């Protein structure tokens, strides 16, 4: 595992997961619900920014690595899954939406692992659709964590709309990756 700035940022993103979740477990005497939402939103946003920054720096500093390419989407999935479980617990996301997103992440991760074992990992490499799906998920989660009004618009309503759109993109990207893998699946 190359210890470089991009990989360290990815590890930081993973380490911030229990921090943004832990904020909600602090006693109300320590932090009001408003401040819990605020702090978890800021921490999640900071973690999400490292997703963009680690990729940018890896390319700019010529520090791309196979390990970094593997760890980056794992960190994304851990963040999204952890946040969705918390948002379901808080009653901000329907369980079926969380199940669709989490189920897809597990299924496609398993598909990619299987394809890599067949030597066909390039056929299920991350696509632009997958990246757009992740952006929708991250923005929706940010808005749902915020749970406040932003410029007069209710963040939770916008977040709910975006998480439903993210679920649609999630299903679409799953179908896309399955179609790409179908020839290899049919042969094995």
Image (tube, rainbow, N blue to C red):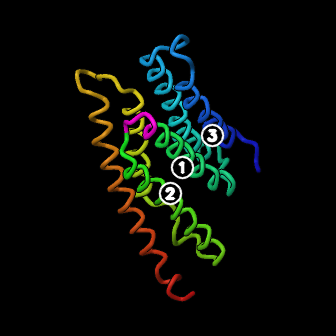
In the displayed structure, 85 sits above or below 46; it is: below
Q: Residue, x 26% and y 21% (percent of image)?
A: 151
In the displayed structure, 110 sits above or below 77; it is: below
Residue 5 is situated, as x and y percent measured from the top left of the image, at: 68, 38
Query: Can you name the residue that lies furthest to the top here?
Result: 29
User: Nearer the N terminus, badge 3 or badge 2?
Assistant: 3
Closest to the observer, 68 or 169: 169
Which residue in the structure is indicated by mark 3?
14
Which residue in the structure is indicated by mark 2?
105
Mark 2 is surrounded, within 10 Å at the Cα level, by few (under 14), some (14 to 19) or many (20 or more) other residues, namely: many
In the displayed structure, 117 sits above or below 104; it is: below
Residue 87 is situated, as x and y percent measured from the top left of the image, at: 44, 37
Residue 46 is situated, as x and y percent measured from the top left of the image, at: 53, 30
Does the stretch in magenta take in 32? no
Per the rendered image, the range of residues in magenta is 87-92
User: Nearer the N terminus, badge 2 or badge 1?
Assistant: 1
Measured Cα–Cα span from mark 3 to mark 1: 10 Å
Helix, strand or loop for disc 3: helix
Quadrant location of the C terminus in the rendered image: bottom right
Q: Residue, x 29% and y 23% (percent of image)?
A: 150
Q: Residue, x 53% and y 82% (percent of image)?
A: 184
Measured Cα–Cα span from mark 2 to mark 1: 7 Å
> Which disc number belongs to residue 117?
none
Q: Residue, x 67% and y 40% (percent of image)?
A: 11
Which residue in the structure is indicated by mark 1?
77
Residue 143 is situated, as x and y percent measured from the top left of the image, at: 37, 32
Asked if the residues shown at circle 2 and circle 1 are in contact, with their CB atoms under 8 angstroms apart, the answer is: yes
Closest to the observer, 161 or 134: 161
Query: Can you name the residue that lies furthest to the left here?
Result: 152
Helix, strand or loop for disc 2: helix
Main SS type for the magenta part? Answer: helix
Measured Cα–Cα span from mark 3 to mark 2: 16 Å
């Amino acid at each position: 595992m190359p210890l470089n700035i991009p990989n360290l940022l990815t590890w930081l993103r993973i380490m911030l997961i229990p921090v943004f979740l832990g904020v909600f477990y602090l006693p109300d005497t320590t932090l009001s619900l408003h401040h819990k939402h605020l702090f978890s939103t800021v921490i999640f946003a900071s973690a999400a920014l490292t997703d963009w920054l680690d990729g940018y720096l890896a390319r700019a500093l010529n520090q791309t690595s196979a390990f970094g390419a593997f760890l980056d989407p794992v960190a994304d999935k851990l963040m999204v899954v952890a946040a969705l479980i918390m948002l379901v617990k808080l009653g901000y996301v329907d369980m079926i939406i969380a199940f669709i997103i989490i189920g897809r992440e597990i299924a496609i991760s398993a598909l990619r692992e299987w394809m890599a074992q067949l030597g066909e990992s390039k056929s299920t490499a991350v696509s632009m659709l997958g990246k757009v799906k992740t952006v929708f998920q991250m923005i929706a989660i940010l808005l749902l964590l915020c749970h406040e009004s932003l410029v007069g618009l209710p963040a939770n309503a916008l977040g709910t709309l975006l998480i439903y759109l993210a679920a649609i993109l999630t299903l679409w990207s799953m179908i896309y990756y399955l179609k790409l893998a179908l020839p290899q699946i049919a042969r094995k």
